Image (spheres, rainbow, N blue to C red):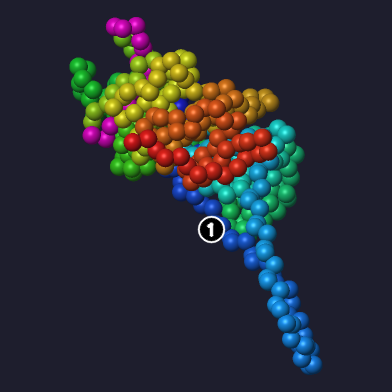
Amino acid sequence: MKKIFARCAVPAAALCILLAGCSLRPASSAPPATPAPTPAGEPAATADPTPAAPTPTAEPPAQQTPAAGPAALNYDEMRPVEVGGSTPTGVLEGYFTVSRDGKWGLIRADGTEILPCRAETPVARCLPQGHWMWSVPAMSWEEVDAKTAELEAAGEAGICPGHGGGMLFFFYDLDVPGRDVHALDPGAFRAYYAGDGPGDIVEISDEMWETCGDLLPAFSAHEEGEAGDPVYPGDPVIRENEDGSVTEYMYISREGWGFDVPNAQMAGFFYDEQLAPVQMPGGWTYVDRTGRVLSTTDYYDPTYATGPKLYNDPPSTEPYYAAPLQNGYVAVRRGDAWGLLDAAGAEVIPCEEAGVAWEGTTLWIKQADGWHQSELPAKTP
């Protein structure tokens, strides 16, 4: 199948991937942070039966040295955790996948390590089971079971043991009987859903709208499939426009209207945010809910997830997609320079930092000595 941001390919059954090409951005499943224990005081001295002579002048209490700030995190990279293992559909709040010396692990958003940097690829979250995809070479099943027991005892999800996958994506069905060929016909909005078995073309349900948002990325396609077999959408039908642009992707709304994004090669989800990532021929940018593209010249580079390159031999760890917004912000980059974009499309942190990480709750900025937690800047009016 052609690579599509809004859908996922089904890998081998031994690989654990998401149930749907769009999934609900899960709220953090991290247990509440455990407060650090208060250092125990010195044991009280045993009282001397003979009273000591009074001290004429009491010494002032010693000044306590202020506690040092939190140490920097010593990681090479810090990325959002992809929900699923093939096509990204969201970012998991409360966690980051981190790398050191080419190996990947997992931390909570507050910096607490969950999985050490041992995996060959960034850690992801599979659905619907919610396991961690932590691919450590030559890891035995006994070690997987032991690590899972350790994680579950700490209130975390276990390691993915491998299972089948599925897909869900949205398209405009050109073969719906009675479709209005002169206008956008809401009756032609369709979803393609597959569980562990053969998929089918279905109407977009209320649950799908509520889960994936009221504006969905879609492409036009004809139905394909052998007689007697389940039908499926073919590759996107690309339309050439009078101004020389081409239309491959559109956004369809629950209310029945939609808009094109000319020249977009991939399109991501809005969810409940004001911007969605789209890939243009020159790179990634963002589109707002009216169809306005932020820039057609000043593009961003991918920031998370490995997409189909995960299945290369050896698998690639290079990011493949631009992240969706989370709670009004998203980390963006141009080359090695990182910044933070807000929902108005402004770089509230210009792309000048060595690293910026944001997953919806906690901001980290990379400095010379490592990653430091930072306050969010004010949003633009």
Residue 35 lies, in percent from the top left, at: 59, 61
Task: Please state, as top left, top right, bottom left or bottom right, where the C terminus lies in the image.
Answer: top left
For label 1, the SS is loop
- Looking at the picture, tell me which residue is in the foreground, 199 or 310: 310
Residue 225 is situated, as x and y percent measured from the top left of the image, at: 41, 22
Q: Measured from the top left, where is residue 136 in percent x and y?
A: 70, 39
Residue 164: quadrant of the picture: top right
In the picture, measured across the screen, residue 332 lies left or right of residue 58, that is left
Q: Which residue is mark 1?
A: 32
Which residue is depicted at the point 31% across and 20% down?
260
Part of the protein shown in magenta: 242-255
Determine the residue positioned at 35% across, 16% down.
Answer: 262
Q: Is residue 254 magenta?
A: yes
Q: Is residue 361 visible?
A: yes
Residue at horizontal 60 percent and vertical 42 percent from the top = 372
- Whether residue 236 is visible here, answered yes or no, is no
Query: Horizontally, is 129 left or right of 183 in the view?
Result: right
| Residue 328 located left or right of residue 17 | left
Amino acid at the residue labelled 1: Pro
Give the quadrant of residue 40.
bottom right
Whether 247 is among the magenta residues is yes
Vertical placement of residue 161 versus 238, above or below: below
The quadrant holding residue 31 is bottom right
